[in-house]
Structure formats: C-alpha cells, structure tokens
Image (spheres, rainbow, N blue to C red):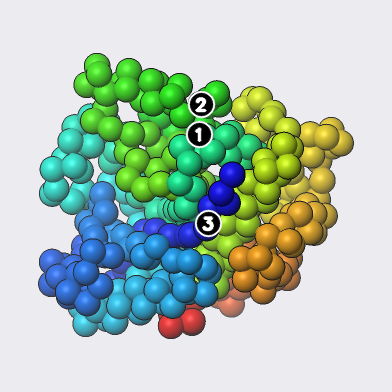
Amino acid sequence: MTEPDFTIGIEEEYLLVDRDSLALAVAPEALMAACRAEMEGQVSPEFLQCQIEIGTRVCKDVGEARDDLRKLRACVARHAADHGLAPIAASCHPFSDWKDQHHTDKERYNVLRRDLGGVARRMLISGMHVHVGVPSEDMRIDLVNQLSYFLPHLLAMSASSPFWQGEDTGLASYRLTVFDNLPRTGLPPRFSSWAEYERTVHALVHMKLIEDSTKIWWDLRPSARFPTIETRICDVQPKLEMTLSLAALTQCLTRMLSRLRRRNQRWRHYDNFLLDENRWRAQRYGITGGLIDFGRLEVVDFPVLLDELVALVAEDAEALGCTAEIEALRDLLETGTSADRQRAVRTDAIEAGDDEAGAMRAVVRSLIEEFHADL
C-alpha cells in the first residue's frame, strides 16, 4: 500500500468592509479584476457581493501553504485598500444585517438562490476549507468515516462567529446555525465503500435534484473536483498562523488515521447522534466548555483534549514538517479563540464608555488588524 503525500490546499472566504463605516461593502468589479490579474485562478467572487474567496495552490506542506496564503491575503488587502475597503476573516460580520446584502449575479449563484429560497438570503457567513490529498477513492471514504470524530475539535478551536446583527448570540460559532438550514449539511453519513458513496450521489443527480456532488455540503466530504478529503467544519480565521495550525492538524490527523490503517488498526466509529452532541458543544462553547470523550463517558476540559491531540499526531507532525504549527495550537489556551477575543474587545469598549454600536465597530477594527498582522 503506497502512502499518500498528504498534500494540502486551503480555501478561505473573506468579508469586505468599508474602512470608514466598518459595515459590509460590495466588492467592486475593478477589485475582483485586479486580484484575478495578480493571482490568476486563485481569487473569485462568492455567493454574496460582499464576499471574496481565495484558494491556495496544491501545497506539499504547511510552509508552502503559508507562502501562498500570505500572498493571497496580501493581494486582497492591497487591492481592497485602493477602494477604501478592508477584508476581514470572521465567519459572521459583527453587526451588518443579512437583509441588506445581495447575491452575486452569476449562474451558479442565481440557481442557488432560486433553489434554496429564503434560506439562501441569510447566508451571510464565511468558512475555511482544507483539502488533504488522498488519491485512493476507497481510502478517502474510509478516512472520512474515521476523521468525522475530530470535526468538533476543529470547530471548537476555529470558532470566530459569536455575533449576529449586532447581538451576542451566546454561541462561539453562530455560522453553523445559519449553514445547517441548507439541505445536505452536517456530519457526513457513513459509507462502506466509494461505490456506495457514488451510488448515493448518483441517485440525486439522476433525479436532477443536484448537478453533482459540489451541492453536497457536509462538514467533511470527498472533494468533487480533486483527489482529496475536504474538511468544511471550520470557521474562517482572522489570523494567518491559526489558519495554518488548523490546516496542519487536519493534515496530521489524516496521516495518523492512514498510519493506523496500514497497521490494520482504525479509530473507533461512533454514531452521528453522539458526534452531533460534541459538534453542538463546540458550536456553543468553543474551547471553554469541554468535549465528550466517548471512551471515558465524560466531558473532558479542552486543555486536556488538546494535550492528547498534540501527542496523538506528534509522529505525523514531525514527518510532515509542521511540529511548530501543531504546538502553536496551545496558544489558544492563552489568547482564546477568535470568538473569545471578539467578546473581549466588545467588553473593553463598553467599559471604556462606548455604546453598543461603537463596541461592535471596535470589534471589526480588531478583525481588520488581525487580518493584516502577518502580511
């Protein structure tokens, strides 16, 4: 059995804000054209006119991904500044109203708007997707079945959407409450083989309910376009380095499960009913509430879980050259997730005398600063 190279690719969706009002703004065509000219094929419009999507090339390791992602973020930031705009990488804008946003006039998005009705209008959310190269189709399905266990852990660490339309939702990742209103979302079902997966997808395609598997939006899926496993659970990250740490962890977990597979071992499968409980806990609390360890049958504090995760993939991180990025996940225990930091900025602003609207603007300013910090 040939071991995959575990190449990675990262996709991120950014929101564009006006530098004066800090509210969402439409991406001008001149901005999109300038980005496409500089980073051909790697920058594109997204569903809403206030969004822009980027994608790295296929990268052999996290170091290569860092170089490409930094170029992409810098490109978007530089050309946005020419129009008085700035990108932010948070999964929900802290105060803008979804009812004021409009979808991009593009055939795919027009069809999406028609098919999904009012659900599509609320899609003022941004995510982060990580692709890990696994050429074997049956191995992809086998690893997806096992990797699902770790999706709540990735969500908890990535949480960046505590606010919605100017209010604290009480959730660390409000994005998922919006996204889960779409069909074909949530945890992936368990398939016994690639053939079973293809038959399932083909049933919907045959009935003309979907064109292809790109309309299947599970938290984790075999990619429709590439020989990869694609994780879609994460909120997008304001900080470049945290994006890379989460991508490195995804890559390492995939290699770890492949390594077990080569030894005729595997991660224990748990029903999605149980995994959904951890998904909810991650969505609600981020890293502050702990997740269930189903072997122990108890809720375990996240610092303990993180120690176990780092140890679990240590061999894989060394092999993939990303030990530093994996160790950097421990910084979350000091700085908190983006959701934690956004709430802290709001609290500080209120205590300094700002009203609620002023505090929300302070949160957006902090998101702009974090986006630009590593460029």
**Position of residue 178 measured from the top left corner of the image (x, y, whole percent):** 43, 40
Amino acid type, callout 3:
Phe
Residue that mark 3 sits on: 6
Q: CA distance from mark 3 to mark 1?
A: 15 Å
Q: Is residue 162 above or below residue 213?
A: below
Disc number for residue 284: none
| Pointer 2 or 3: first along the chain | 3
Residue sitting at x 38%, y 20%: 199
* Residue holding disc 2: 193
Q: Earlier in the sequence, mark 3 or mark 1?
A: 3
CA gap between label 1 and label 2 equals 6 Å
Across and down, in percent, residue 47 comes to 26, 49
Within-10-Å neighbours for mark 2: few <14, some 14–19, many 20+: some
Which residue does the image show at 22% across and 77% down from the upper left? 38
Would residue 284 be found to the left or right of residue 265 on screen? left
CB under 8 Å between discs 1 and 2: yes
- The image quadrant that residue 248 belongs to is bottom right
Spatial CA span between label 2 and label 3: 20 Å
Who is closer to the viewer here, 296 or 344? Answer: 296
Q: Does dot 2 land on a helix, a strand or a loop?
A: loop
- The residue pinned by badge 1 equals 138
Report the amino acid beneath label 1. Asp
